[in-house]
Image (spheres, rainbow, N blue to C red):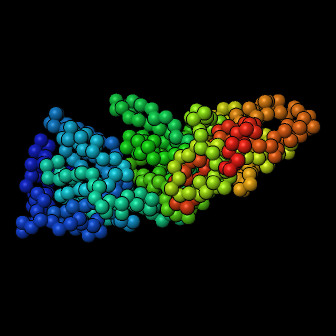
Amino acid sequence: MSWANNNNPSEFGTQSCWPDGTVITSGRNVAGNVASGPTAIKDLWPQTPDVTLMGLVLTKQDPRVIKNKNNPGADRSVLSFTLRDSPIDFINVSCWGRTFFIDDLAKKFKIGDIVKLQNPQIMPKSNTEIDERYKPWTPSHFQLSFSEKYSSLQLYSSWDASKYADLAHVPVQDSKDFHTLGEILSNGQNLHQQHVNIFALVKNIGQAKDISTKAGRQVKRIELKLLDETCPSMALIMWDEPIISYAQQHWVERETVIFVVDVLAKFDDFRRTMVLTADSKTIFTTNPDTKEAYSLFEYGKSVDFDDGPVDSFAPTVNLSTIKDVYNVGQLQTKLSDISCQVEYGLMYVFLSSFNIDGSNVTTYRCSSCRFRILQETGMCSNPSCSSSGDNAVAEPILTFDLRVNLSDHTGTVTKINMNEKLLQELLGCSAEEFVQLPEFRRTELKWSYLLERCKVYFKVVPSGFNGANNSLRLLACQEADPKDVCNNFSLA
């Protein structure tokens, strides 16, 4: 923000009026009357007195220091964020002040918080190239400037805060206006350095790393993997601490769907593929309340990430601490319960489908990234893998790939993925050893478990979508002790 006729930054925040001549007030309008309530973003107009806004923080950038070459030591800092108070109304806010003040202000709120903003200055958009390149697009004709001396911001938690919180799941643009990840890959250099919209499922969240820039700044960097129906994996890189923290706290691998507006698509020369980078224009909507998001979530659940790296789903708790016994009917109820939290339990069930003597028991995966090897080409299906470049052939690893059905007198749960680790423990051999077994031995192994009572430990993971089925992950599968079965017969 440029202050008219004020070349001395040390005087920032001492003015009695805004640059356009509007008198700055302190919580009262010109007539001395107390402001009557919040102002909606759609009703903003220059010289509107006593503006109080409530809304959801959509985006937030790290504070930046603006050096003053003419007056060293009088540097200012700026903090930018985007505020939303309705499905169609959101506006950019710039907070200017002394560095220590802006740093303290940045600590007071984060992306996803509901805040109350008082007495900002309403300014027309500048519509400059800088705004176009570095600020999120908003439908408002105005932008807000926050003064260190006259403006205030605080968290808002009154009775009506939920109406703003619900906006976190409403896309800021038409949810049908997006590129698939496959389109981005196929268009390649045509979309290089272009901002695009995407719908994707969060596949993997990497570890945040501290990076030193050429200018000597310390920043954070994190890389995520995304997927959709057209692409098994694409990298998304984030640099700003606020969105990195939000992703780490609110996104769940293989559960969260995101609608991303204005993410930068780039061709990475080193990886020889397209990657996505979130910048200061990017806006994320987590688990959007749309048919497209639900469809993508269902797709991710149905394929069980078979085109991605193998996961052992090793239990994160001691199995001996899991005491709650379910039958299949109760488990099915739990899987469809929209208020379900993460649940652990065990069942005494039959393996009603265990086709280890069939043709689709094993698959080949890449030794570098553990993604599937494409049968047609012998290449890794992960476009970001180092082995998926021109004429590169991935070194294959043979792994188990099997789904099973679990049944009791109350019903059947079908097509449950039994991961590599469980199958190795159950069969007593690796995938490579298994394929060497003669057919009669595979049939013997099959009937030693098929229709036999097993003790199965499981974990139910909430879907994150209203009305969606939750996910079931098997932690262990053991031969059931007849005494345990009898003791739990009413449930088993």
Q: How many marks?
A: 0
Residue at (72%, 43%) from the top-left corner?
486
Q: Is residue 30 above or below residue 343?
A: below
Residue at (78%, 30%) from the top-left corner?
428
Residue 303 seen in the figure: no
Question: x, y (%) of residue 475?
Answer: 65, 39
Residue 62 seen in the figure: yes
Question: x, y (%) of residue 418?
Answer: 71, 42
Residue at (48%, 47%) from the top-left corner?
251
Direction from residue 406 to residue 1 in the image, left or right: left
Q: Is residue 143 above or below residue 270?
A: below
Direction from residue 314 to residue 81 in the image, left or right: left
Direction from residue 341 to residue 311 in the image, left or right: right
Question: x, y (%) of residue 152?
Answer: 19, 52
Q: Nearer the viewer, residue 447 or 419?
A: 447
Q: Is residue 429 above or below residue 106?
A: above
Direction from residue 242 to residue 386 in the image, left or right: right
Residue at (55%, 53%) from the top-left corner?
463
Question: x, y (%) of residue 255?
Answer: 55, 49
